[in-house]
Image (cartoon, rainbow, N blue to C red):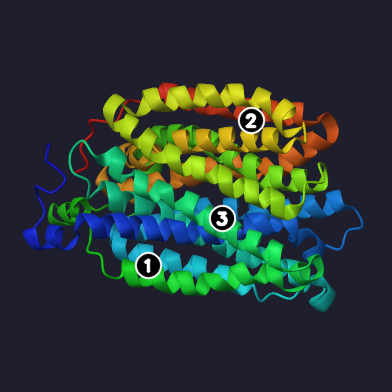
Amino acid sequence: MSTSPLSATPPDVAGKNSTSRVIFASFIGTAIEFYDFYVYATAAALVIGPVFFPHSSATAQALSAFVTFGIAFVARPIGSFLFGHFGDRIGRKSTLVASLLVMGLSTTLIGFVPGYDSIGSLAPILLCILRFGQGIGLGGEWGGAALLATENAPPGKRGWFGMFPQLGPSIGFLASNGLFFGLALSLSDEQFRSWGWRVPFIVSAVLVAIGLYVRLKIAETPAFQAAIDRQERVRVPVATLLSQHWRPTILGALAMVVCYTLFYNATTFSLSYGVSALHIPRQTFLGMLCVAVVFMALATPLSAWAADRFGRKPVLIAGILAAIVSGFAMAPLLGSGSMPLVLLFLIVELFLMGVTFAPMGALLPELFPTNVRYTGAGVSYNLGGILGASVAPYIAQVLAAHGGLTWVGAYVSCAAAVSLVGVLCMRETRHTQLM
């Protein structure tokens, strides 16, 4: 049966979700959630190690901080299974509200956890629990936001509509890094390590309140409402997904690897390496990252437009091939220690992140039918996070210590090659109808 996204939807349901409301609700949620997530990533590179892990070695502290960083990526698929179940059974709207609450509460509480000097080993335990909560919340966020955008999109515009959740990470990163940048400029090192790093976590509470206000005003998506009308919901979406749709789930996860690897090696690892090994001042490197992420934001709409015009696969293949080549530029650019060359490296990596990330907002939902779409898109997205991001900064730190940046660059190229295999093996989804 072939219908347009709105054809089976009662007029009152479709009318409630205006274009501007859909765009803003899908964008603001991911921006806030990724702000929360990146706040921890930045803190892990700068301060989590010394505050929560009393090793004598700075390298050991960094590795411990990056282990806690990776915990959230293990939790994210669990969150996608959990929230995906309710998103496919109950609806997109209520599930998106719940995921935002879990993420926001976990992030805010991290800002209040005392350090190791105050409560001993309980400090890293509480940190790990709350970091796990961050992963659970984000695991349920992205799939719902992408579906909110794409299931409301007019024909031929899904790549464009699916771009707005993909803009959220750029804005969230810019907000979190910008706040850390401002704190680095205004506080001494002692003030920053003592209490300043906690401010971005606590600010999350205000942002979450804004996001909840917006999310509570949206209506259910037309495609899900149509599935309810046709009585197509399944009892256990994850069981249906794993038994009938395992292949697109795996291919979608492989396609996501390049996005995660590019981003977290260009930000979390590079920030840690730049400050500790290259001795670039913290505020200077944070400022360069703020400049570079603007290019990621610029690449996102360009890539989304191209994905609607030429198809998802051609755009992704071109971006992934460029990412493979970029791995060879890591040592000469980042390793030079020259500010212009380091900035150029960050710009190239984050621009390519935007190119490869933008089509995913439409591609992953298009791989699955409505009754398992929330679960399928979320699981693919977050399994890719385990493969491409959970251990990326840790592996990069180990490789840099033993073989230098050339090895880290080779790791980036290999991760991109994994995504190339996934994209080449999947079908083109541009003309798929979301029913």
Measuring from the top left, give residue 302's x and y in whole percent.
37, 35
Residue 343 sits in which quadrant? Answer: top right
Q: Do the residues labelled 2 and 1 touch (CB within 8 Å)?
A: no
Q: Which residue in the protein does label 2 denote?
A: 412
**Residue drawn at (32%, 58%) of the image:** 24
**Residue drawn at (33%, 40%) of the image:** 362
Which mark's residue is nearer the viewer, 3 or 1?
Answer: 1
Residue type, mark 1 in image:
Val
Q: Which mark is residue 97?
A: 1
Considering every residue shown, the one lying at the far right of the view is 56
Residue type, mark 2 in image:
Val
Determine the CA span between mark 2 and mark 1: 35 Å
On the rendered structure, is 27 left or right of 12? right
Q: Residue 176 carries which label?
A: none
On the rendered structure, is 26 left or right of 298? left
Q: Do the residues labelled 3 and 1 touch (CB within 8 Å)?
A: no
> On screen, 363 above or below 267?
above
Q: Which residue in the protein does label 3 denote?
A: 75
Measuring from the top left, give residue 328's x and y in whole percent.
67, 23
Residue type, mark 3 in image:
Ala
Measuring from the top left, give residue 256's x and y in whole percent.
49, 37
106 vs 18, nearest the viewer: 18
> On screen, 48 above or below 354?
below
